Image (cartoon, rainbow, N blue to C red):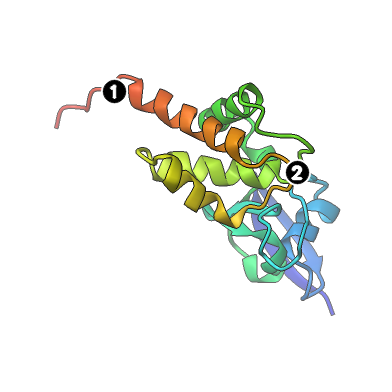
């Protein structure tokens, strides 16, 4: 028996009837044709399926679509114009932080979270934060350098003056 689900996906209202055990990753891939969300381990371990759920990184493979009813979902496609994501994509390219690309969407979403949540993260902290995202190709060095370069660039930017009270 199918159940109704209503979500905001990448800023767009979405309604569907889905099986109760359909995971969010399969929903966005198969029903919405948003294929940047990759399915790897299907146990929430590899991070390839990472999306933003109400603004926080979440594993789409272990979240049922019906349990996300009423929530806001952002996939990598929904972050294409995000200023931090634009910088991260450029840094990943400059630092050779991707090879096969399978982990890249989840890695980028996690990297964005690190940049926004931990503006003073050092290499060790970046590595700890990336521990939930597995990459079999890169050895992580380029990924860590890319994130560190975006953090460094953001720290060196002049801060905007605060508005008078």
Q: Left or right: where does residue 37 sit relative to residue 8?
A: right
| Total tally of numbered discs in the picture | 2
User: In percent of the image, x 77 and y 57: which residue is there?
Assistant: 40
Decide: marks 2, 1 in contact (CB < 8 A)?
Answer: no
> Would you identify the image quadrant in which residue 116 lies?
top left
Query: Does residue 161 appear to the left or right of 125 in the view shown?
Result: left
Mark 1 burial class by Cα count in 10 Å: few <14, some 14-19, many 20+: few
Residue 141's tag is: none
Judging depth in this view, the residue of 136 and 45 nearest the camera is 136
The N terminus sits in image quarter: bottom right
Answer whether residue 49 is visible to the viewer in this image.
yes
Residue 15, by quadrant, is: bottom right
Q: Residue 136 at x, y = what percent?
A: 73, 48
Q: Secondary structure at mark 2?
A: loop
For the point 80% across and 67% down, the residue is 17
Q: Which residue is mark 2?
A: 36
In the picture of the structure, the residue carrying the numbered disc 1 is 160
Q: Position of residue 72 (x, y in %)?
A: 58, 54
């Amino acid at each position: 028996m199918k159940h109704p689900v209503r979500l905001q996906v990448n800023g767009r209202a979405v309604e569907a009837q889905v099986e109760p055990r359909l995971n969010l990753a399969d929903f966005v891939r198969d029903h919405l044709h948003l294929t940047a969300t990759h399915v790897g381990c299907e146990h929430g371990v590899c991070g390839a399926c990472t999306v933003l759920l109400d603004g926080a990184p979440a594993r789409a493979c272990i979240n049922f679509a019906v349990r996300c009813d009423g929530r806001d979902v952002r996939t990598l496609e929904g972050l294409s114009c995000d200023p931090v994501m634009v910088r991260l994509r450029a840094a990943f390219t400059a630092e050779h932080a991707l090879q096969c690309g399978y982990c890249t969407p989840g890695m980028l979403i996690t990297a964005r979270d690190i940049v926004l949540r931990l503006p003073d993260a050092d290499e060790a902290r970046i590595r700890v934060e990336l521990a939930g995202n597995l990459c079999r190709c890169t050895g992580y060095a380029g990924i860590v350098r890319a994130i560190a370069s975006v953090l460094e660039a953001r720290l060196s930017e002049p801060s905007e003056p605060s508005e008078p009270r």
